[in-house]
Image (tube, rainbow, N blue to C red):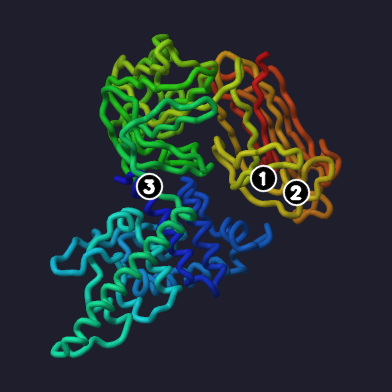
C-alpha cells in the first residue's frame, strides 16, 4: 500500500533524476518525463495520451495528427533508453526507480531493493555513497548528482556504506603497508577525505531541502493555530507531511481520540480530485477530533471518499451500506450521512463545507463521528480563516497551473471537474478581457461539482472565448460549428450555446452570469456543459457567495 512517505519519495526520485544532468542535451525528454509524472501525481493518469503529450508537453500545434507525426513514440523510446542507461549506471543503487513500460506512457515506480544495512568494519561517519564507483574522479557534477539523489532519511542518518577502497579511489594510491610514515599519511588523508565528503554532503543536503519537497518528521506537540494560519490534517497518516498540487502542506494525523488508521489500496483511483494522496488514508471507527484554534471565524472542510463499500470496491454494497453522524461543537451537522449518495458514486472525492466555525469555550473545535449502520470514517480536515457569513470564492482557470490576472486576482488551476480534458490555446487573441485567462480551456462533455456551504445563494460566472472555430482560428468555420447546453444544478440555463455567435468575434470573450443559485441537497454547485454540436468548451469560472 502506498503511504504519504512513499508518495513523496516518488516525487523526490523524479526531481533527482531531472537534476542529474542526463537530460542536459535532450530537453524534450525532460519535458516528457515531467509531464507524465505530473499527471500521475495529480491522479490524472487517464489524460496521459499521445495527443496530450504532443500538444501540452512537446509544443505541437492543436491540429497534431499522431498518424502522421510519430514524435511522441520516438521521444518515449528515447526516454526509456535513457532511463535504462541511468539506472544501469549512476542510478543503479537507487531504491526507487522509474520505468515507462513499453507501449504505455504512464510512469511506473519500481522499488528495487531495501536500503543497505550497516556493515561491520566499515568507516563510520562518512556520507553514504549510492554508487561509490562514480566518485572515482573528483568531478563536482558527479558528486552533486549522487548526493542529491539520496533520500532525506539517509542524509539525516548516514549509514555506513562507504567502503575504504571506494574512498581510496578518489586520491593517490595507498602507500606500502610496511612504510610506517606512509601508513600514517594514508590514515591522515583518509580522515581528511571523510571529513570533506561529510561537509560536502551536509552542504548539498541543506541546498536540496530548498529545492525538493521532503517528508518532514511529525512533532510531538501541536500548538493551537494562530489567527490567519491554516490547519490541514491527513487522517490516518501516522507520520510525515504531504505537499499537494496547490503547494499546500498537509500534516500527519493529530488531535484525535479513538478510531484506527486505515489505508486504501495504492492502485485505488479516486475520481474528482487532483490529489489522490489526500484520500489514500482514513481514520475509521467511533472517533473525535479536538482541534485547538485561536479565537476567530474559520471555514471548515471535511474530505471523504468511500473506497471500501460500493460497486467495484472490496466490500460491495452501495448506498445505505455505511451511514453515520457528524457533530460540530456538539451540534449535529450531518445525520445518516451516506458518502456514496452525497458524492454520487463510490471512490469519488466528496467535500463538506461549513462556514462561520469558531472554537468552543475551551478554545477547540470539536468534531464527533458516530455510527448509524457502519463505522464512520474521515480522510482529511482543512481549516482556514473565514469571512463572516460567507465561504471563500472559487476562481478557477481551465489550466494545469494557476495565474494572477492583470487586476492582481488569483485564479486556481483547474479542479473539481469530471469529464473533458485541458488543452492550451496559445493562439487566443481576446481583446475585451485579460487574454491570459483564455489561453487554455477544458473541452468535452464537462461537469464541475463545487462544494459549498448550506444554506446559501451564489453567483456563478462562466468565461468563454472561441479559440478553435472561426476565421483566423485553427479549426476554421464559424458560427454553428460549436453548440452546447449549459445547466446549473440540472436546470437548463442556455440551450445550444454558441460561443462565437454570443461573442460576435474570435477576439471577444463572453461571460454568462447567473445569480441566486442555491446548492443541491448534497451541498454542491453543479455546472454541466453538454455538447450538441462538436464539443463544449470553457476557459474559467467563478462561484461567489452572495450572503450579506
- Gap in Å between the C-alphas at discs 2 and 3? 42 Å
Q: Residue furthest right?
A: 504
Examine the image and state in which quarter residue 537 appears: top right
Q: Nearer the viewer, mark 2 or mark 3?
A: 3
CA neighbours of label 1 inside 10 A, class few (<14), some (14 to 19), many (20+): many
Query: Which circle's residue, 1 or 2, is located before the other in the chain?
Result: 1
Q: Determine which residue is flagged by label 1.
A: 441
Q: Residue at left 35%, top 17%? A: 368
The answer to the question of whether label 1 and label 2 lie on touching residues, with beta carbons closer than 8 A, is yes
Residue 426 screen position, x and y as percent: 72, 54
User: Is residue 485 positioned above or below 142 on the image?
Assistant: above
Label 2 sits on a secondary structure element that is loop
Q: Nearer the viewer, mark 1 or mark 3?
A: 3
CA neighbours of label 3 inside 10 A, class few (<14), some (14 to 19), many (20+): many
- Gap in Å between the C-alphas at discs 1 and 2? 9 Å
Q: Determine which residue is flagged by label 3.
A: 215
Q: Residue at left 36%, top 39%? A: 280
Q: Determine which residue is flagged by label 2.
A: 467
Examine the image and state in which quarter residue 322 appears: top left
Label 3 sits on a secondary structure element that is loop
Q: Nearer the viewer, residue 177 or 64?
A: 177
User: Is residue 190 positioned above or below 458 on the image?
Assistant: below
Q: Quadrant of the C terminus?
A: top right
Please state if 214 lies on the left or on the right of 413 as rendered: left
Q: Residue at left 30%, top 61%? A: 95
Q: Residue furthest front?
A: 181
Q: Inspect this view and state whether residue 514 appears.
A: yes
Residue 17 screen position, x and y as percent: 44, 64
Q: Quadrant of the N terminus?
A: top left
Amino acid at each position: 500500500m502506498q503511504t504519504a512517505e512513499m508518495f513523496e519519495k516518488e516525487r523526490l526520485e523524479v526531481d533527482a533524476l531531472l537534476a542529474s544532468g542526463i537530460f542536459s542535451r535532450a530537453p524534450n525528454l525532460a519535458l516528457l518525463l515531467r509531464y507524465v509524472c505530473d499527471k500521475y501525481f495529480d491522479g490524472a493518469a487517464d489524460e496521459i495520451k499521445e495527443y496530450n503529450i504532443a500538444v501540452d508537453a512537446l509544443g505541437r500545434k492543436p491540429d497534431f495528427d499522431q498518424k502522421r507525426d510519430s514524435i511522441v513514440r520516438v521521444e518515449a523510446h528515447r526516454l526509456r533508453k535513457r532511463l535504462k542507461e541511468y539506472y544501469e549506471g549512476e542510478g543503479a543503487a537507487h531504491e526507487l526507480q522509474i520505468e515507462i513500460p513499453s507501449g504505455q506512457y504512464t510512469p511506473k515506480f519500481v522499488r528495487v531493493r531495501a536500503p543497505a544495512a550497516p556493515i561491520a568494519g566499515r568507516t563510520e561517519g562518512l556520507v553514504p555513497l549510492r554508487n561509490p564507483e562514480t566518485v572515482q574522479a573528483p568531478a563536482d557534477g558527479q558528486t552533486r548528482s549522487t548526493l542529491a539523489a539520496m533520500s532525506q532519511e539517509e542524509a539525516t542518518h548516514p549509514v555506513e556504506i562507504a567502503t575504504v577502497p571506494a574512498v581510496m579511489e578518489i586520491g593517490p594510491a595507498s602507500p606500502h603497508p610496511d612504510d610506517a610514515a606512509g601508513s600514517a599519511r594514508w590514515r591522515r588523508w583518509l580522515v581528511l577525505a571523510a571529513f570533506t565528503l561529510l561537509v560536502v554532503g551536509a552542504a548539498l543536503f541543506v541546498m536540496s531541502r530548498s529545492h525538493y519537497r521532503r517528508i518532514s518528521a511529525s512533532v510531538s506537540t501541536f500548538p493551537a493555530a494562530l489567527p490567519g494560519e491554516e490547519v490541514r490534517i491527513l487522517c490516518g497518516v501516522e507520520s510525515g507531511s504531504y505537499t499537494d498540487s496547490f503547494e499546500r502542506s498537509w500534516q500527519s494525523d493529530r488531535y484525535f481520540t479513538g478510531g484506527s488508521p486505515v489505508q486504501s489500496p495504492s492502485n485505488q483511483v479516486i475520481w474528482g480530485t487532483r490529489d489522490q494522496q489526500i484520500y489514500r488514508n482514513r481514520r475509521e471507527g467511533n472517533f473525535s477530533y479536538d482541534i485547538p484554534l485561536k479565537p476567530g471565524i474559520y471555514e471548515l472542510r471535511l474530505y471523504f471518499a468511500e473506497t471500501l463499500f460500493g460497486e467495484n470496491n472490496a466490500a460491495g454494497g452501495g448506498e445505505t451500506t455505511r451511514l453515520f453522524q457528524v457533530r460540530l461543537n456538539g451540534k449535529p451537522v450531518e445525520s445518516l450521512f451516506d458518502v456514496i449518495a452525497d458524492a454520487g458514486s463510490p471512490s469519488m472525492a466528496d467535500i463538506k463545507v461549513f462556514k462561520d466555525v469558531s472554537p468552543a469555550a475551551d478554545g477547540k473545535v470539536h468534531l464527533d463521528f458516530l455510527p448509524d449502520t457502519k463505522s464512520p470514517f474521515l480522510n482529511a480536515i482543512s481549516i482556514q480563516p473565514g469571512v463572516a457569513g460567507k465561504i471563500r470564492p472559487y476562481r478557477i482557470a481551465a489550466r494545469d497551473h494557476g495565474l494572477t490576472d492583470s487586476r492582481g486576482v488569483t485564479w486556481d488551476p483547474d479542479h473539481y471537474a469530471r469529464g473533458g480534458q485541458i488543452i492550451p490555446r496559445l493562439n487566443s487573441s481576446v481583446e475585451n478581457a485579460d487574454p491570459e485567462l483564455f489561453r487554455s480551456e477544458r473541452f468535452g462533455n464537462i461537469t464541475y461539482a463545487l462544494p459549498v456551504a448550506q444554506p446559501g445563494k451564489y453567483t456563478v460566472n462562466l468565461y468563454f472565448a472561441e479559440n478553435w472555430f472561426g476565421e483566423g482560428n485553427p479549426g476554421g468555420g464559424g458560427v454553428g460549428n460549436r453548440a452546447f447546453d449549459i445547466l446549473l444544478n440540472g436546470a437548463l440555463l442556455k440551450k445550444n450555446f454558441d460561443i462565437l455567435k454570443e461573442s460576435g468575434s474570435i477576439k471577444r470573450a463572453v461571460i454568462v452570469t447567473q445569480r441566486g443559485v442555491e446548492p443541491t441537497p448534497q451541498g454542491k454547485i453543479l455546472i454541466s456543459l453538454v455538447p450538441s454540436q462538436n464539443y463544449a468548451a470553457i476557459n474559467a469560472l467563478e462561484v461567489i457567495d452572495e450572503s450579506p
